[in-house]
Amino acid sequence: MTASKLLSAVAVALLAVAGSAHAETYDGVHQLTSAASRADVSSQAVVAAHSANPYATGANSGPAQVFVSSTSRAAVRSEAVAAAHSADPYAEGASSGVAPVVASTVDRATVRAAARAAARGDALPL
């Protein structure tokens, strides 16, 4: 046997011994201890079974809550008509209105030369 095979066999044996030394023990099933009597638990179960589910979502959660609006129907309608007749009802901040024309300070010939160089795989000057 070579030294490497002998060392690997010793290492595996040591790992097996170390692994078995850290194994947990089984204590069995723990005894159930409760302060409530069987009749108390039964009555609590009946109450819980007949009450509403506090964790229900969606269709199982019951009727929807009624929301009371503080704005009149006429005010909401007039705002909707004004938004529908505006230029862009979805415009926000910088996107509202016409975009400004930005003039470039780079020469057109310089941009073309850089594009041709990039297409040929030449290194671009930085």
Image (cartoon, rainbow, N blue to C red):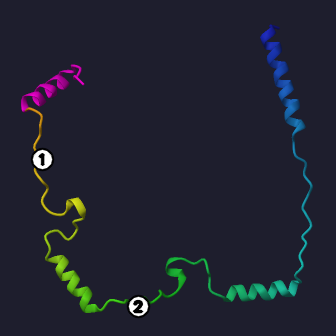
User: Is residue 120 one of those drawn in magenta?
Assistant: yes
Lower position in the chain sequence, tag 1 or tag 2: 2
Figure quadrant of residue 68:
bottom left
Q: Is residue 94 above or below residue 40?
A: above
Q: Amino acid at mark 1?
A: Val
Mark 1 neighbour class, 10 Å CA radius: few under 14, some 14 to 19, many 20 or more = few
Of the residues tagged 1 and 2, which is closer to the observer?
A: 1
Q: Is residue 110 above or below residue 1?
A: below
Q: Amino acid at mark 2?
A: Val
Q: Which image quarter is the C terminus in? A: top left
- Residue 80 in the image: x percent, y percent? 22, 81
Q: Residue at x 19, y 77 (%)?
A: 83
Q: Is residue 102 above or below residue 38?
A: above
Q: Residue at x 12, y 59 (%)?
A: 98
Disc 1/disc 2 C-alpha distance (Å): 49 Å
Nearest the camera: 56 or 85? 85
- Residue position marked by numbered label 2 in the rendering: 68
Nearest the camera: 23 or 123? 123
Look at the magenta stretch and give its main secondary structure. Answer: helix
Q: Range of the magenta residues? A: 108-126
User: Is residue 117 one of those drawn in magenta?
Assistant: yes
- Residue position marked by numbered label 1 in the rendering: 102
Q: Residue at x 89, y 76 (%)?
A: 34
Mark 2 neighbour class, 10 Å CA radius: few under 14, some 14 to 19, many 20 or more = few
